[in-house]
């Protein structure tokens, strides 16, 4: 395996492609309890191994973002997307 | 299962949002559907009966869309409780049909796995199979049924005969209902959700062959429509066209309706009925109800836009584009849809706030929803604009009247943003916001049939209101305006001796600074029942007020009798005033108490008074008095 950098989806930019590495809800600054945010993310398909592509971002501060998770497009704010750790899928 | 033979088996449709569940429901039940409320809550309960090919009468329930039975909003709680058979007064469904979008099955399969644990018979309907095929997606149904452990059929809600297989399978299952699993559902934790999604992914890989590409049309459209800058411009342009259309396209039809009622009135005039009865029919009923029904074309056009945008899948995009802007004002991106619905009517808008999970975000949205210019204000705006604003073109293509209308809408929106900003920053300063997470579905062409059913439901709702609430208010106004009758030998117009005039005069000291005369005061009272009634009431008042030939031309009457300052002040009043008893009633019901209803009433009344006062005084100072 080559080393692939792990970043938070909340820091990614349009055109980013990769796979979900892990969900880390510990230090997200959202209005939800940690376990609740985690469950909601999973219900929308954010599980480890799923493919991710960042499709669109908003005008102000690039927020919110629209991401393709497998076959579904989900809109969310960068703040919540910080809890989704992703590996970039670059050249092998 | 069904001991009593007269009880139709209940089939519940459960699925993710945007899976085409409602289209399927429409296809199954057509116009035989009933929309009511679940007892004690205001979640819409949509049911419909139909006879299957096997000759069995079944009752189909369309449940609010959800990703999980782990309910987070009142809507989703209803879905959970109905599915679990826990809702008082509702029998549990005999069969759960999990509806999945065939081109996007991943989340639906996880939901299906969860539904199996409810302990009721479950089957999966692969909906929108036609679209999936077109995109080269192949699904091995036999294998899917085996892997999932529930029957699987295809359905195409939008094509004739597209539900035949589904109905035949329902027939077959109802003969001998198989249990899908043991009844051990409880709210899953993150670990369980994760493993069930993994299981769903495994099944998906085993049974679905797909190029894995995005829908090309959607990708191309989103490149423009979700473009950070262009997307916002397009959204504003869509809203602008919508409002121009409401004002311009409806005109010919409105004229036709107006002529029809005018003709009815003339007929009554020519009849040999006693004078008092003639006045009641013509000035009370016909001109009153007619002046409200005339707005049906505008309401239908507005709902047409909202329904088309919703069916297209654009509403979710609008929420995405607006999230940051609305967030700046303290509103949640999801509030965009309820607030946009509030342009039709605040009642469905307030009910739609259920999609906002966080109570405070929801309350803020409810508080400002009535500030969105609802369709009931259109009659009032149209009347006053038509009477006082010249019908001129600006820059060759924008009507001045339409522009003023747009300005009134904009004022309402700005007012709402301001109020929510104040509420969020001053009252609920320290709570972090609710996350914004929303699926952006693939674009789909709206279906004529679905649109027609939606428009029909809205139009009949409006007409029913015009026929009952509004008609009875018109009768009451006519009574107030006609009695007591003037004494023998009275010289003034008859209405100045009536109860209506007394009420209007009593309110005079309060509304005089706003430039309102007693006729306006009187019209504002029945306007509490429904805003548009004020128009009919003005008609009644001015028709009886000696100006017989102005009966169907209220506009001319007020143009002659009000100053421009008064007219503008009334417009300003109408932007903010809590002029609708049903909205207040819904707020009370939705917030579970009187408190927020009174808060809404008080702040809106205050804003309305201040706005009308300012408008009137400034306009007078500028010489419009």
Image: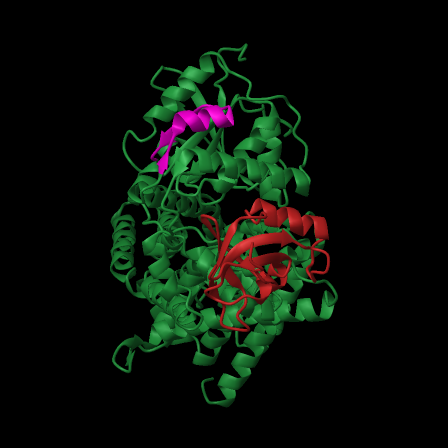
The foreground one among B12 and B345 is B12
Please provide percent x and percent y for residue B14: 50, 34
Q: Is residue B352 above or below residue A9?
A: above
Residue at left 55%, top 61%? B333
**Quadrant location of residue B577?**
bottom right
Image quarter for residue B454?
top left
Question: What are the residue bounds of the magenta stretch?
Answer: B138-156
B480 vs B429, left or right, is left
On the image, the x and y values in percent for residue B418 come to 60, 72
Name the residue rendered at 47%, 76% in the picture.
Answer: B568
Q: Quadrant of the N terminus of chain B?
A: top right
* Above or below: residue B296 compared with residue A55: above
Q: Is residue B213 magenta?
A: no
Comparing B340 with B386, the one in front is B340
Residue farthest front in this picture:
A1
Q: Is residue B155 part of the magenta span, yes or no?
A: yes
Q: Position of residue B142 (x, y in %)?
A: 40, 25
- Image colour for chain A is red
Q: Residue furthest right?
A: B430
What colour has chain B?
green
Rendered residue at 66%/26% (across/down): B184
Extreme-bottom residue of the structure: B622
């Amino acid at each position: 395996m080559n080393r692939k950098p792990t970043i938070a989806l909340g820091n990614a930019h349009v055109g980013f492609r990769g796979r979900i590495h892990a969900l880390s809800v510990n230090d997200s600054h959202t209005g939800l309890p940690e376990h609740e945010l985690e469950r909601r993310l999973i219900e929308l398909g954010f599980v480890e191994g799923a493919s991710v592509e960042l499709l669109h971002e908003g005008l102000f501060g690039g927020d919110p973002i629209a991401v393709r998770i497998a076959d579904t497009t989900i809109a969310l704010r960068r703040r919540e997307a910080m809890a989704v750790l992703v590996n970039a899928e670059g050249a092998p | 299962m069904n001991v009593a033979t007269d009880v139709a088996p209940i089939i519940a449709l459960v699925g993710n949002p945007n899976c085409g569940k409602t289209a399927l429901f429409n296809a199954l039940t057509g116009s035989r559907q009933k929309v009511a409320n679940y007892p004690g809550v205001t979640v819409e309960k949509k049911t419909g009966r139909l006879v299957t090919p096997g000759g069995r009468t079944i009752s189909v329930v369309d449940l609010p869309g959800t990703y999980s039975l782990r309910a987070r909003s009142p809507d989703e709680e209803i879905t959970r409780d109905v599915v679990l058979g826990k809702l008082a007064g509702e029998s549990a469904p005999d069969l759960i049909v999990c509806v999945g979008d065939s081109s996007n099955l991943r989340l639906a399969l996880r939901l299906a796995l969860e539904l199996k644990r409810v302990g009721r018979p479950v089957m999966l309907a692969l909906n929108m199979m036609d679209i999936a095929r077109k995109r080269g997606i192949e699904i091995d149904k036999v294998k899917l049924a085996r892997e999932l452990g529930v029957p699987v059929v295809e359905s195409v809600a939008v094509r004739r005969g597209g539900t035949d297989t589904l109905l035949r399978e329902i027939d077959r299952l109802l003969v001998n209902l198989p249990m899908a699993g043991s009844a051990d559902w409880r709210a899953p934790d993150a670990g369980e959700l994760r493993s069930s999604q993994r299981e769903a992914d495994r099944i998906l890989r085993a049974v679905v062959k797909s190029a894995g590409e995005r829908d090309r049309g959607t990708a191309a459209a989103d490149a423009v429509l979700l473009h950070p800058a262009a997307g916002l411009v397009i959204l504003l342009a869509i809203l602008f066209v919508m409002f121009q259309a409401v004002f311009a396209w409806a005109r010919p039809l409105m004229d036709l309706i107006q002529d029809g009622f005018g003709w009815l009135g003339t007929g009554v005039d020519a009849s040999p009925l006693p004078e008092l009865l003639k006045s009641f029919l013509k000035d009370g009923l016909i001109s009153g109800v007619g002046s409200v029904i005339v707005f049906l074309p505008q309401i239908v056009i507005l709902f047409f836009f909202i329904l088309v945008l919703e069916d297209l899948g654009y509403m979710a995009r609008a929420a995405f584009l607006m999230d940051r802007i609305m967030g700046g004002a303290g509103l949640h991106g999801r509030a965009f849809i309820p607030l946009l619905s509030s342009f039709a009517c605040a009642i469905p808008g307030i009910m739609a706030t259920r999609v906002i999970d966080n109570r405070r975000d929801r309350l803020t949205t409810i508080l400002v929803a009535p500030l969105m210019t609802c369709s009931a204000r259109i009659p009032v705006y149209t009347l006053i604009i038509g009477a006082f604003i010249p019908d001129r073109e600006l820059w060759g293509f924008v009507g001045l009247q339409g522009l003023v209308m747009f300005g009134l809408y904009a004022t309402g929106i700005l007012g709402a943003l301001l109020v929510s900003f104040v509420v969020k920053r001053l009252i609920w300063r320290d709570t972090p916001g609710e996350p914004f997470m929303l699926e952006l579905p693939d674009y789909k062409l709206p279906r004529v049939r679905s649109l027609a059913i939606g428009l029909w439901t809205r139009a009949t709702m409006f007409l029913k209101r015009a026929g009952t609430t509004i008609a009875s208010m018109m009768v009451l106004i006519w009574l107030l305006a006609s009695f007591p009758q003037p004494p023998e030998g009275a010289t003034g117009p008859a209405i100045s001796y009536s109860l209506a005039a007394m009420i209007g005069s009593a309110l005079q000291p309060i509304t005089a600074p706003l430039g309102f005369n007693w006729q306006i005061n009187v019209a504002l009272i029945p306007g509490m029942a429904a805003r548009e009634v004020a128009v009919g009431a003005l008609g009644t008042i001015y028709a009886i007020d000696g100006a017989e030939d102005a009966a169907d031309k209220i506009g001319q009457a007020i143009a002659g009798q009000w100053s421009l300052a008064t007219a503008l002040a009334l417009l300003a009043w109408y932007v903010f005033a809590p002029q609708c008893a049903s909205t207040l009633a819904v707020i009370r019901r939705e917030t579970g108490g009187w408190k927020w209803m009174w808060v809404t009433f008080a702040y809106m009344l205050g804003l309305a008074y201040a706005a009308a006062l300012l408008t009137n005084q400034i306009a007078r100072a500028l010489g419009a008095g």
